[in-house]
Amino acid sequence: MSTMSPVPQKDEGGASFYGYIRPDGKIGTRNYVLVIPSVGCSQGAASAIVRGIKNAVYLPNVLGCGQVGEDRLIVKKTLAGFGINPNVYGVLVVGNGCEHLSAEELANEIRSSGKPVEVLVIQEVGGTRKTIREGRRLIKEMVDRASKQRREPAPLEALIVGTECGGSDYTSGLASNPAVGVASNMLIDRGATVILSETPELIGAEHILAARAKTPHVAKRIFEVVEWWERKALEAGQNIRESNPSPGNIEGGITTLEEKSLGCIYKGGTGTVEEVIPYASIPSKKGLVYMDTPAHDIEQLTGMAAGGAQVILFTTGRGTPVGSPIVPVIKITGNKDLFRKMRDNIDLDVSTILSGKESVTEAGERIFKEVIAVASGKPTKAERLNQRDFCIFKMYMNI
């Protein structure tokens, strides 16, 4: 069965979706076989291995060697997180043989999920051509086994839904972000987990999030991660509060970072912030979770996918084609002109809020229903365009 085939919803009240049950009990919204190059040197082989094979994808990873300390841990955690993500049926890790992050080390992390994992090392196999030939054989066998798996009813509490805004304008804070917030509340009320991210674009509104923290420790962590980003920018000779919003944001009607941040936090709804987690980490709590990520769109998407998100809600007022290798990304806009210009990129138009044809609650309910449909197999515009972007956040420089 294709991972891209829509599955009808038969449940009452939208309390479940149809997904793929994994050996560790998690539920996937897609059924990909993933090829992960453990280092940039093996990226070419990984790309060639999946070429032309339906439902097989690879990560365009350029890291895995030259990173040390915290950066090495982030690279390893992110790559392993993609392999563990429930949207992946099985994994082939392709290494070169002399890198800092070995293919076998990475594979061992992914095997903890119980899913099939294979390893090929170019230097051991005997060159790129042999690696590609053997890799395609392994992937075709894995894809064949994956195709025999069928979607089954699953509770919404099995979902982790990421949220993101990129290319924002004035309609983001007035329409699309509040509507996503309604959908987030509906998901959380049914036991799902929602990730709020992009710390640099929450600066100026951190006190509002901290006031909603479940514990004093969580509130403290919110202030700490914001302070870290401001300090990091100052050390580089930059002031985030002066360099943000971006020129595109300003052209779109956003005048200050605080204004941008106040619109950004709407995406998480009105619930309690249960925990603050590092980049690419899997939430340990249900409900609203705050992941400390950069503001860069692709790095955010990558972090949330590595953290187990099976669906991502992405609002935009200026427009963006960005997608993920393994996670369906639902694009939402409150800008009617943008929807007209970029219909091939935007899934939902909620400009009806600003025109008075629909309330924020009604638009949010529509987004909630779209999450269930996409989780059950409906393809997003980014998936139809084969938009598979990937970029790992690094804290420091290469050596």
Image (cartoon, rainbow, N blue to C red):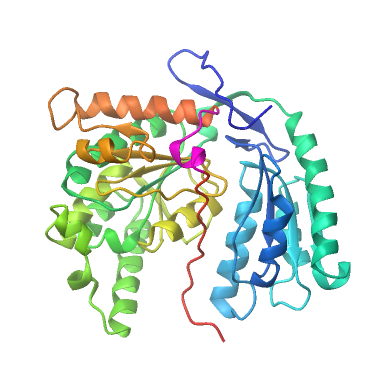
Question: Which residue corresponds to the image point at 58% horizontal and 67% vertical from the top-left?
Answer: 75
State left or right for residue 40 relative to residue 322.
Answer: right
Q: In this view, does 312 lie to the left or right of 74?
A: left
Residue 61 is drawn in which quadrant? bottom right
Instruction: Say above or below: 26 vs 395.
Output: above
Where is residue 182? Give x, y as percent.
29, 33
Which residue is at a point 80% across and 54% down the rendered structure image? 135
Farthest residue, direction bottom: 399
379 drawn magenta: yes
Residue 275, image x and y in percent? 42, 52
Q: Determine whether, in the image, residue 361 is placed left or right of residue 163.
A: left
In the rendered image, residue 225 lying in the magenta stretch gets the answer: no
| Horizontal and vertical percent position of residue 201 | 28, 59
Inspect this view and state whether residue 138 appears. Answer: yes
Task: Out of 176 and 262, give the one closest to the viewer.
Answer: 176
Residue drawn 32% across the image and 84% down it: 235
- Give the magenta part as a residue range: 377-385
- Quarter holding the C terminus? bottom right
Seen in the picture, residue 257 relative to 102 is either above or below; the reply is: above
Q: Can residue 282 be seen in this view?
A: no
Residue at image x 67%, y 57%? 47
Q: In which quarter of the view is residue 190 placed?
A: top left
**Residue 176, placed above or below residue 273:** above
- Residue 159, x across and y down, in percent: 51, 36
